[in-house]
Each structure stands twice: as structure tokens, then as C-alpha cells.
Amino acid sequence: MTPTQDANKRIRLVMHLRRMGIADSRVLGAMEKVPRDAFVGPELKHQAWEDTALPIGRGQTISQPYIVALMTQALELKGRETVLEIGTGCGYQTAILAHLCRRIYTIERHKPLLEDAEKRFEALRLRNITAIAGDGMKGWPRINGIEPEPFDRIIVTAAAREKPPQALKDQLKPGGLMVIPVGGSGEQVLKLYRKESEDTFAVRDLAPVRFVPLLPDLAPDKPNGDHAAA
Ligand code: SAH
């Protein structure tokens, strides 16, 4: 791809996102800057700037750019926040957020996906990301018995069956925002939770969506993860 072709693809995506209703200029700037082609396999690079979800291995997907932009915009980031992300996947959403907040903590249950994502963060020189393999339904783990500081924002990029995990509600700062898809396959809704006090939340529906499910525990170490044939 020539530099002009590359710039054209980026601008075309940003114009499309604008038409779809994404208005936050910092979000659009990050979507233009982060090279989505660096987050997919060589056979999919030609489709990387299209507004579609794509497979990333282990039965998982890189989200559609419009949904990434919508979720990011819903977080109302100003630049000083600490953010917790559940479901690193290939790391694309993480990279977008890294440009828009102070520090991002991210958890992925498929170790090989996490390792590839970390290589990409290194190559893109994104230094404000802390990534671990684990079960994000339990929130960020205690270190030496000490609870992590509550987060200003939480983003979950896999769908909770019925409601957000309690650990995530607990780790959100009062006044903070959490964006999370909720529901079974075929009936998921992207929801925005605003924590109004220690145990009250205002909830708003943002859009119908289709995400892979949020699953407990580290994934078994086989090439197809949970989707391996029996
Ligand atoms: N954010 C990614 C989308 C990844 S798809 C992107 O930008 O493309 C959702 C990811 O959530 C998958 O990689 C899946 O393995 C992961 N996931 C599901 N349940 C999880 C859990 N309990 N903890 C951590 N990661 C989880």
C-alpha cells in the first residue's frame, strides 16, 4: 500500500464513523491514528480498514470499528483517567484507549492472544498499558493482598449473560462509567452504567450488538480455545 492509499483508507473510515454519529474528535483522531492492519493476520490486512469485525484466532474477533468508536465515545475520556478493560483480544481497542487516557489496565483469558497483543503494544511504543492473562470477571487482581484503586472507567468487550460481574461494579469509582454488552447470543444490548454512589447505578441502552461471550477462568491451552472440536 502506498502512503497515499493508506491515508485515504484511514480518512474514509473516519468519514464513515462521522456519518454513523461518532462526533468526539479525540475518538475520531485515535481511530485514524491506530493502524488496525497491525492487529489482524496477513490474510486479512486488505480488509483491515473496512467497518467489519474480523477473526483473530482462538474463536475470537476484533470488533467492528464503529462499535469500538461507540464504546470509546461513551466513556467520555478527557485524558487523565485510569481505565480497566476486560477482553484484550488482539489489543486494538486497548491501543485506541491508550491514546485517550492516562493508563489502561487490560485482562485477557487467552494467553496466546495476550502475548501477541503485548508484542503489538511494544512495536507501536504504547507505554501506558498494563496487560495480564486472567479472568476479568473477577476484576483486577489484588497484589500482595492489596485491593487495586478503583477505576475511573471500565470497558468490557465480551458479553455478560445477564448482568455485569459484581467485582467490576465494585472496582468502578463513584461517578465512573462502565460500558458492557449484556445478553445471550442474538439479543445483546450495549449498556452504559454510571455509578451514582457506592451501590446505585444509572443504566442506559446504547445499541444492539453481537459480541463473543464473557467466560470464566483462563482458557484451556488448545489452539481453538473453547471452540476446539471434542
Ligand atoms: N477488544 C477486542 C475484542 C476482543 S473479543 C478488540 O479490540 O478487538 C473479546 C475478548 O474477550 C476475547 O479475546 C475473549 O477471550 C475475551 N474474554 C472473554 N471472557 C473473558 C474474561 N472473563 N476475562 C478476560 N477476557 C475475556
Image (cartoon, rainbow, N blue to C red):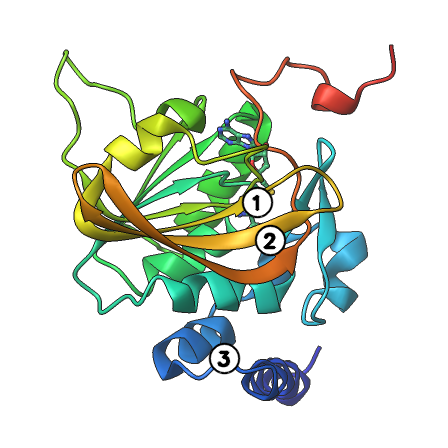
Q: Name the residue nearer the viewer: 27 or 172.
A: 172
The secondary structure type at the circle numbered 3 is: loop
User: Who's the residue at 16% across and 61% down the image?
Assistant: 80
Indicate which label's residue lies in the foreground, 3 or 2.
3
Picture quarter with the C terminus: top right
Q: Choose the circle earlier in sequence order: 3 or 2.
A: 3
Q: Marks 2 and 1, Cα distance to the nearest angstrom?
A: 6 Å
1 is higher (above) or lower (below) than 164? below
Q: Callout 3: few (<14), some (14-19), or many (20+) C-alpha neighbours within 10 Å? A: some
Image coordinates for residue 56, horizontal then vertical, percent:
69, 43
Q: Marks 3 and 2, Cα distance to the nearest angstrom?
A: 22 Å
**Contact (Cβ within 8 Å) of mark 3 with mark 2:** no
Q: Check disc 3 and report the residue beneath it.
A: 22
**From the Cβ of disc 2, is ligand 1 less than 8 Å away?**
yes
Q: Is residue 11 visible?
A: yes
Residue 90 bears which disc, if any? Answer: 1
Q: Check disc 2 and report the residue beneath it.
A: 39
Q: Callout 2: few (<14), some (14-19), or many (20+) C-alpha neighbours within 10 Å? A: many
The three-letter code of the residue at mark 2 reads Phe
